[in-house]
Amino acid sequence: MSLALHAGFLAGAWLVLAAAAIPLTRSPRGSEVFYVLAALVSAAGAASAIYAAIGTLPLTLSVPIGLPGLGTRLRLDALSAVFAVIVNGAACITSLYAIGYGREEPEPLRVLPAYALFLFGMNLVLIADDAFSFLIAWEFMSLSSWVLVVVRHRDAESRRAGLLYLMMAALGTIALLFAFGVLAGGEGAYTFDAVRGRTLTPITAGIALLLVLIGTGSKSGLVPLHAWLPPAHAAAPSQVSALMSGVMTKVGVYGFIRIVFDLLGPPVWWWSMLVLALGGLTCVLGVLYALMQHDLKRLLAYHTVENIGIIYIGLGLALGFEAYGMNWAAALALTAALFHVFNHCSFKSLLFLGAGAVQTSTGERDMEKLGGLIHRMPRTAFLFLVGCVAISALPPLNGFVSEWLTFQAILLSPDIPNWGLKFLVPAVGAILALSAALAAACFVKAFGVSFLGRPRSPAAERAHETDPFSLAAMGLFALLCALAGIFPGIVIDLLSPAVSLLVGSKMPVQAALPWLSIVPIAESRSSYNGLIFFLFIAFSASLAALAIHRFASDKLRRAPSWDCGYPDPSPWTQYTASSFAQPIRRVFGTFVFRARETVEMPAPGDMGAARMHLELRDLIWDYLYAPAAAFVGFAAEALNPLQFQTIRRYLGLVFLALVSLLLVLALWP
Amino acid sequence: MAVIRQIVLEGAQLLLVLALAPLFTGYVRKVKARLLRRRGPPVWQPYLDLARLLRKEVVLAENASWLFRAVPYLVFAATWVAAALVPTFVSGLASGHAADLIAIVALIASTRFFLALAGLDVGTSFGGIGSSREMMFATLAEPAMIMIVFTLALIAGSTQLSTIAEVFVGPSVGLRVSLGLALVALVLVAIAENSRVPVDNPATHLELTMVHEAMVLEYSGRHLALIELAAALKLLLYASLIACVFAPWGIAPSGAGLLAFAIGVLLYGAKVAVIGFLLAFFETSIAKMRVFRVPEFLGVALMLGLLGTLLLFVTRSL
């Protein structure tokens, strides 16, 4: 298996598919044909990555297309293979979903070609082996996903989301461009191999790290560069939201791992502190923002921010361990991060697909207008519940395993001989535990308000079950969540080639352990067994059910709800999304969001309703984005006169610019 | 042979906690009543209550879903397993290698997750208020618990409860500041997790202040029996946890003889009796606090847990 075949097949297939999408959209069943083909191509892409990974890695390929003297270099190593399997696998299942969901699309011509190009771009990022092809692939991915975000371009909110996304993507690419410039240095080491060969000074490497954090962080949604995610994910069609949130943010993480762990050389302690601090901040802010939302897709998007934080915490720990030569511990932390990449991809895609099913069935994303869907969409409800349990890090599903591994890595960190890290790591551990608990509250809210209770609008009352393709896709993701949770050892073993490639050490082989346990370091320290745990609970639950049905009364009577004797038939007396979050808002929101509640009571004797106003402020927006936007506006206003000059003045300005550039060059040491 | 021995011991532990849990609840109620100079119901009253609930029919709200009916079984099973994973009279069982202390905490978290969903299922205002407040408490109680786990795990070098118990019974641990902090934090968390005074009142009904009871208000018959039994198991779980970590004496290794097991069971009974008495004493001497004071109460637990962990990160000897 050569890389030429893998890359050639993917490039050919996706580009042909993108072109073929244009005539396909004219036929009524065209989008179904397109998505079937897309699912097949993705499946083949995943299979070819798996096949390549079984053979000897890395595979390299040099194509004489591109810049003269450089061409395009491609490379598939263990890390690329892991991400290629995740990306293509998720794309395959998502395309399966879109076979049914895509039928409802009013403007398929705006979606299908960009969808194919988007998947092509993501695949290309993973195998790019020089700075130019990496950046081109990165931009390809950003721009094609931008087209998908602005599909509903007549909607002002969509356009605004698209603009914000485009600007953040541009910022990220500029940062990456500079990062590669710093890495290339004076000798122009643009291929990744040449960069690996260079030894960077600590300052150069530090600058590169900061630029990479901006570049890849803006793509994966690291706080404070997360602002584009919620509007963009909410605006895009659901199969695209699933891909952007479940997959594209992971390609951002791939970029970070590739550059920082692979290209940048041995890490320094403060890198770890920076990444840990940003990860912790991302984690807790992401989930708190998510709790304040009542739009289902925005809630999920903010939750992606939290999960990216968990991944970056794992990466930061790995950097810290590696900086002090504890590579065996770095392997554990990195495995936890990569495991969470896989997990988040599976459950977040599942949840976005579920939100899409709810949206097609009811036309609503606003949770305050949903409710009672478990009766009308029982299968979707069950699968969505599986996603909620998994993302809340509850055993025996997969979210718990990666969280458990991260906790185990934290427990190894007292051995790091650095005082800054000694104080930061326990705090980050507390933040991680806090976010897990908040995530559980958030998903009780998301599931409880949208699927349980009584319908809050006629649309929710008329909801119907979604199509079988969508159900099958969600079922597959749910199955992945369950399998990875019950057999975590297999996933850990599959990740170990990538881990040992990056930190030169790996976790013990898990498949060799009896009873499919997982053991991070040694059995005397800690171990977890998803299978036995699951069987234990299943056994005691069935025992309880059996005993109850054998010995207890099995009479059952349906009656109006009790509610302490005062049941109210109006669905508005139920708890809503905002009332559910109110206690948490009072505890955390007064500080984080400057939340202010004011209640207007009618005058005594007045029978009118009391009103409550809630004011939340997004401090990051107010203090970072708004000033930046104001500055850009001010600068544009100030430079505006330059637009209306005579040709003489323009030539003068050009000359001035040239001279000043030459001066800089001449004076450069 | 070793496998059969393990299974028998595991089964004995499962049965022990199941049989003891209602008795423990009844005992705490009795002590509370005696401290208030009431006679109080007999200690076996919870068994009678459970038997009565099991005989009664289930009155199910009209729009209750399948989830509402499945939750009691799930919650009961998860709590039962969690309670049996804490070493009571025997340590070193194989199940301890399947699930460590973090997994037990997560298991408790999942019972709360499902109970909160059940509270929202019928769509009543009481269910909602209970779920919402319970989850708010959990957002602080759970990280506090994880921090306690960190403190214990850093001292013992393991997150497995039986290893922690074995290390703590040895002479190497001694009195430590971090352990003291962890004990106080654990007590605070245990009080909040079990909805005891001052966080919540297990005896209250028809009051706006109730949290846990509001959440399970719509349950009746066998479903309610399972939930009550799960609540009793959870109370016993925290008592055994405190006993296992802070008074690990007399816990027999899994290879010991019958006499060691008998001593283990007796000592375990004595330990939880003392803990139950202290709980009842604490509850009668304090008033219930307002809901929005609870975050401060749990914030103290979180800070103590974090402080304990920090101390251990700074030096292993504190």
Image: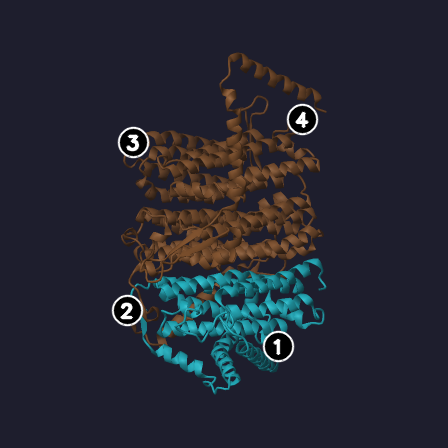
Chain colours: A brown, B cyan
- Which residue is under mark 2? A558
- Which residue is under mark 1? B256
At mark 2, the secondary structure is: strand
Residue A50, horizontal then vertical, whole percent: 50, 42
Q: Is residue A206 above or below residue B11?
A: above
Q: Classify 10 Å Cα crowding around label 3: few (below 14), some (14-19), many (20 and above).
A: few
Between label 2 and label 4, give the one nearer the viewer: 2
Task: Name which residue type carries label 4.
Answer: Glu
Residue A12, horizontal then vertical, whole percent: 44, 30
Between label 4 and label 1, give the one nearer the viewer: 4
Residue A550's tag is none
Letter of the chain that mark 1 sits on in the rendering: B
* First in residue order: circle 3 vs circle 4: 3
Letter of the chain that mark 2 sits on in the rendering: A
Q: Is residue B315 above or below residue A264?
A: below
**Is B243 placed left or right of A299 in the picture?**
right
- Which residue is under mark 3? A26
**Is A597 placed left or right of B181 in the picture?**
left
Instruction: Name the residue at 67% across, 43% down.
Output: A267
Q: Are marks 1 and 3 on the same chain?
A: no
Q: Which quadrant of the rendered structure holds the N terminus of chain B?
A: bottom right
- Residue A80 in sight in this render: no
Determine the CA span between mark 2 and mark 1: 53 Å
Q: Classify 10 Å Cα crowding around label 1: few (below 14), some (14-19), many (20 and above).
A: few
Determine the CA span between mark 3 and mark 4: 52 Å
Between label 2 and label 3, give the one nearer the viewer: 2
Is residue B293 or residue A66 the one in the foreground? B293
Q: Is residue A510 above or below residue A130?
A: below
Determine the CA span between mark 2 and mark 4: 79 Å
